[in-house]
Image (cartoon, rainbow, N blue to C red):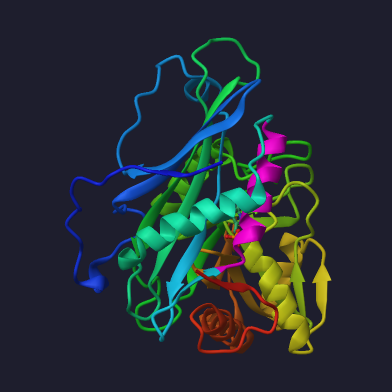
């Protein structure tokens, strides 16, 4: 398939002061779009000016939520080159989400080529200061105009780009976590493993209540026992427990995070043992008090690593490692961001230069 390049009439004004960049508020001049029709497959791939779509009010995504997305970043390196971090892993996960939601897969090589071409055209939008990046959001929605619950026969797939500021300004700041004993994110057999909009809609209520109570994030427990840790907000979570890195196993209810995967590799290389098992609430609360649990952090593309300061369950609050970002947490943050922006060698071939 040939990607058509549509003309750009005018460029948007840009935020010159990169310290003013927020997350996902501003989008670049262009976007990639392609369409799918049952019987015909993907067609009409193009890079066009960023702007609204005209979508029928009956489009199935608005009623039955057939939607998937991805999130990855492009970084500007000291030599000016633009780098992507493990982009194929994101495209493969996009396809796994598509399969779960009865949506068509994209061709991995073609989609990567389209993504790279878009980022190349928009390379001026990749910010320059430390900790900044260009966030890339591939999305797919079911757009057939019809009511009735079944998979759509038409889809729109697009990629938009957003320059994002440094998440941490002046050191990694630990977050206050609230363990929800009322709400769950997903249950076994559900769609927890897919990056699909409905999972996030379902999480809003708990997040809102957590914010009202003065917390930063919700820690989700498993839906069956309401006892074992699954994820925190929309991040995977890791604990340093008895000197081992403990993180929830991929059993269908949590997302297979690419940051999680990278962290596990780095941790093993540092000689720290990894245990993929679900920690219980009691192990967290008692472990933090007894000193068996020394560090905890969330992992995800947006933040890379987010240290947990305190955890609250019902009326009990415990501090993780004195409420400060731990030594391993900091080391992992430095290493992963160092590899991403080219300050540290990349022995695993995670970085792809445009
Ligand atoms: C995206 C996401 C993550 C993190 O995945 P990364 O590939 O590391 O960005 C974790 N949990 C949920 C629920 C997510 O949506």
User: In the image, is residue 31 above or below residue 56?
Assistant: below
Residue at point 36%, 83% (across, down): 170
Within the displayed image, which quadrant is ligand 1 positioned in? bottom right
* Residue 88 belongs to the span the image colors magenta: yes
**Residue situated in front as seen by the camera: 253 or 354:** 354
Where in the figure is residue 116, as x and y percent of width and height? Answer: 49, 59
Residue 324 drawn at (x, y percent): 51, 83
Residue 76's quadrant in the figure? bottom left
- How many labels sit on residues? 0
The span shown in magenta is 85-101
Q: Nearer the viewer, residue 274 or 347?
A: 347
Q: Residue at x 40, y 16 (%)?
A: 57
Q: Classify 293 as above or below 157.
A: below
- Residue 212: x percent and y percent? 39, 50
Q: Nearer the viewer, residue 252 or 309?
A: 252
Q: Is residue 91 left or right of residue 161?
A: right
């Amino acid at each position: 398939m040939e990607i058509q390049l549509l003309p750009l009439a005018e460029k948007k004004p840009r935020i010159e002061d990169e310290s003013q960049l927020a997350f996902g508020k501003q989008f670049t001049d262009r976007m990639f779009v392609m369409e799918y029709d049952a019987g015909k497959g993907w067609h009409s791939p193009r890079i066009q000016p960023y702007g609204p779509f005209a979508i029928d009010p009956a489009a199935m995504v608005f009623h039955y939520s057939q939607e998937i997305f991805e999130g990855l970043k492009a970084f500007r390196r000291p030599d000016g080159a633009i780098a992507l971090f493990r982009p194929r892993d994101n495209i493969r996960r996009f396809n796994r989400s598509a399969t779960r939601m009865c949506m068509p897969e994209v061709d991995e090589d073609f989609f990567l080529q389209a993504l790279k071409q878009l980022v190349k055209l928009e390379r001026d939008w990749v910010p320059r200061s430390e900790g900044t990046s260009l966030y890339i959001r591939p999305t797919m929605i079911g757009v057939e105009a019809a009511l009735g619950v079944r998979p759509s026969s038409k889809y729109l797939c697009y990629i938009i780009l957003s320059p994002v500021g440094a998440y941490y300004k002046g050191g990694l700041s630990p977050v206050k976590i609230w363990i929800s004993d009322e709400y769950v994110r997903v249950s076994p057999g559900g769609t927890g493993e897919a990056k699909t909009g409905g999972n996030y809609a379902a999480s809003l209520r708990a997040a809102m209540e957590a914010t009202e109570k003065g917390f930063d994030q919700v820690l989700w427990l498993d839906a069956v026992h309401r006892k074992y840790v699954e994820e925190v907000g929309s991040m995977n979570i890791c604990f340093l427990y008895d000197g081992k890195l403990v993180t929830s196993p991929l059993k269908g209810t949590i997302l297979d995070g690419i940051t999680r995967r990278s962290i596990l590799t780095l941790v093993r290389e540092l000689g720290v043992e990894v245990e993929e098992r679900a920690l219980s609430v009691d192990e967290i609360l008692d472990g933090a008090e007894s000193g068996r649990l020394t560090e905890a952090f969330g992992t995800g593309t947006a933040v890379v690593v987010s240290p947990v300061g305190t955890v609250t369950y019902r009326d009990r609050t415990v501090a993780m490692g004195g409420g400060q970002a731990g030594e391993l947490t900091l080391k992992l943050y430095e290493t992963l961001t160092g590899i991403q922006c080219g300050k540290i060698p990349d022995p695993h071939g995670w970085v792809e230069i445009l």
